Image (tube, rainbow, N blue to C red):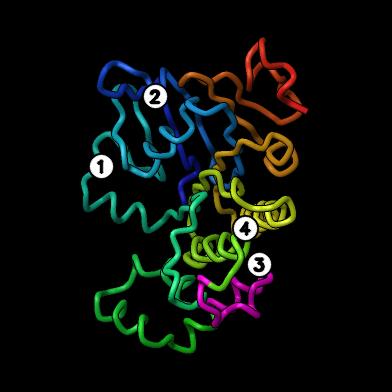
């Protein structure tokens, strides 16, 4: 059963060697089914927060719970199980360039496959696997590219394949780290609309790290703003101010 609270951070801090704070005393609660945009300049703590959420880092102080699992105490075995309930989309697509789009998309399911199943899937897809791949590619307008090699696609098409790879596992929590940073405006809108549809149709909790303020205002029902590791704003898009994101001396930055 999906937990009511997807993410809960209480006085969460991460201190790196040398005493630098990646995050400082952050308290955030994200309910299951929310679509939350996270904004802030480079070095604000957005990536640190995501790495804590996916278990790549452990908290220095405070507590963090993800899908009911305390991340400060999670074992390697439990972390693997937790990650099967999550999906990730990054700025860099990390596709297998010489493999087909279909095989790249199906890779999003391999965390639940046995070794023999994984090896078999590299050779040929079963009919039910092809159906799953086709359905998610249809959602993204990519069915006609299903059997093309990944390295034959444009950058925007590759990003949509990476998104399809994340969606195919029907995750409870999707973390998208700068998913539209390297695509054109039209593709960016398609990617964010697909994430919003996933959020609305399947109830998937979506957290987005973004630099593009306009897109965050259009597509997210809630925004968090980080600056120098601190939470500066948590609320509806309508209430956000330039100074929340860029500080008093950067009022020209939000247009």
Residue at the top extreme of this rendering: 248
Which percent across, then down, holds residue 204?
56, 53
Q: Is residue 183 left or right of residue 101?
A: right
Q: Earlier in the sequence, mark 3 or mark 4?
A: 3
Q: Disc 1 versus disc 3: distance between alpha carbons? A: 35 Å
Which percent across, then down, holds residue 61?
30, 22
Height in image: 138 above or below 160? below
Q: Is residue 171 left or right of residue 221?
A: left
Query: Within the magenta stretch, is there residue 137?
Result: yes
Quadrant assignment, res 237: top right
Give residue 74's mark: 1
Give the residue at mark 2: 22
Q: Disc 1 versus disc 2: distance between alpha carbons? A: 21 Å
For mark 1, does the 10 Å Cα neighbourhood hold few (<14), some (14 to 19), or many (20 or more) residues?
Answer: some
Q: Earlier in the sequence, mark 4 or mark 1?
A: 1
Query: Mark 2, mark 4: which one is toward the viewer?
Result: 2
Q: Earlier in the sequence, mark 1 or mark 2?
A: 2
Q: Disc 3 versus disc 4: distance between alpha carbons? A: 11 Å
Give the residue at mark 4: 198
Front residue of 143/37: it is 143
Give the residue at mark 3: 140
> What is the span of residues highlighted in magenta in the rendered image?
133-151
- In the rendered image, the quadrant that contains the C terminus is top right
């Amino acid at each position: 059963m999906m937990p009511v609270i997807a993410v809960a951070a209480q006085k969460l801090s991460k201190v790196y060697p040398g005493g630098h704070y990646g995050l400082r005393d952050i308290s955030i609660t994200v309910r299951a089914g929310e679509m939350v945009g996270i904004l802030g300049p480079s070095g604000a703590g957005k990536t640190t927060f995501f790495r804590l959420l996916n278990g790549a880092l452990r908290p220095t102080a405070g507590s963090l719970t993800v899908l009911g699992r305390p991340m400060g105490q999670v074992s390697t075995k439990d972390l693997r199980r937790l990650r099967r309930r999550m999906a990730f989309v990054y700025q860099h697509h990390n596709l297998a360039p010489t493999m087909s789009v279909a095989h790249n998309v199906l890779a999003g399911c391999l965390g639940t496959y046995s070794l023999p199943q994984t090896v078999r899937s590299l050779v040929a897809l079963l009919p039910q696997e092809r159906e799953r791949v086709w359905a998610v590619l249809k959602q993204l307008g990519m069915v006609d590219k299903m059997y093309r090699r990944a390295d034959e696609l444009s950058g925007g098409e590759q990003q949509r394949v990476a998104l399809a790879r994340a969606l195919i596992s029907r995750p409870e929590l999707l973390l998208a780290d700068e998913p539209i940073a390297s695509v054109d405006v039209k593709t960016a809108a398609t990617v964010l609309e697909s994430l919003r549809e996933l959020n609305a149709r399947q109830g998937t909790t979506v957290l987005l790290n973004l630099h593009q303020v306009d897109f965050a205002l259009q597509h997210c029902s809630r925004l968090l703003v980080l600056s120098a590791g601190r939470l500066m704003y948590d609320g509806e898009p309508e209430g956000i101010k330039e100074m929340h994101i860029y500080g008093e001396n950067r009022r020209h930055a939000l247009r």
